[in-house]
Image: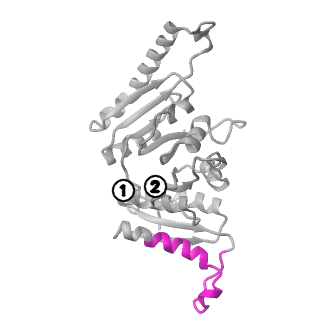
Amino acid sequence: MNAGDAVNPVVTVGLDGTPESLSAALWAAQEASARGATLRLLHAWVMLAPERGDQPQENDRNYWPKRIVAEAARTIEERFPGLPVYQDLVAEEPVEALLAAAMESQSLVLGSRDVTGLAGYFLGDIGMHVLARTEAVTVLVRAREDPASIKENGDVVLGLSLHGTCDALLAYGFGTAARRGAVLRVVHGRNLPPPAYNRGGIDPYLSHEMTTRAQQDLTRALRPWRDRFPDVSVVESVRMESPGRAVVRDIAGTGLLVVGRRIRRPVLAPRIGHVLSAAVHHAPCPVAVVPHA
């Protein structure tokens, strides 16, 4: 099966038996249903044993991996009857299995830990390694108390940098908003330069000038995409503050936050930038990470 082609599109979700991964599976099922795609339920375990049809269940070394995938499949069948679902157990290290699956998928969906306590600071080793290396759109979904409450409602918020081309990011944000019939809120954060600060605080004239210039830059960047998606309602927002802080401000009730990850980063740069780090650690909604040049 070629999961990435237009004829047989696939959305892959990584499962590990946690509440986060079940929420991710339901979000992925909804996404696959909206896109007319097959849902691939993937669980990877390097110790997966060869299948033997004659062994009793109590001796099956693969009992728990099979149960994780089967229970997710049953839950999805109840919510999305008729959705094509492909169950996949892979005898590989999870990171490598997920990276390979992402290459064959329209998007990869992973569970993301909650924002409270220490767990809120760590996406998890597997998720972080995958996120830093994959060139596929990766969506991070937090656990819900009631997984059945997951819905495609709320605005789509797109965090946009204006350094370099962001066509892949804009295409995903506008396309998702159009498919959902949602408002697209485009947020651009920009730090004020040092000359804007003086002993009395912020220079109002220079602050206004920089804000106006940033707004003009944002409007110019969005113009061709507004023309391409005339039915999408777009709200532009310029915030003269840290871009990482700007994208997570006032996003309660947001349906999806879309941020980018530059594939080509300086050798000594962090694996993920400040904006992406803020999004995956602090956004309460699902986060779609779009790799781009």
For residue 174, above or below residue 28:
above
* Residue 200 colored in magenta in the image: no
The amino acid at mark 2 is: Gln
Q: Position of residue 24 (x, y in %)?
A: 49, 58
Q: Are marks 1 and 2 in contact (CB under 8 Å)?
A: yes
Dot 1 or dot 2, earlier in sequence: 1
Query: Which is more toward the observer, 246 or 82?
Result: 246
Q: Position of residue 270 (x, y in %)?
A: 68, 39
Question: What span is colored magenta in the figure?
Answer: 48-74
Q: Quadrant of the C terminus?
A: top right
Kind of element beneath mark 1: helix
Q: Residues within 10 Å of mark 2 (few under 14, many from 20)?
A: many
The amino acid at mark 1 is: Arg
Q: Name the disc covering residue 35, or none.
A: 1
Residue pointed to by mark 2: 106
Q: Position of residue 82 (x, y in %)?
A: 34, 70
Q: Position of residue 214 (x, y in %)?
A: 46, 20
For residue 56, above or below residue 234:
below
For residue 106, above or below residue 72:
above
Q: Residue at x 72, y 36 (%)?
A: 268
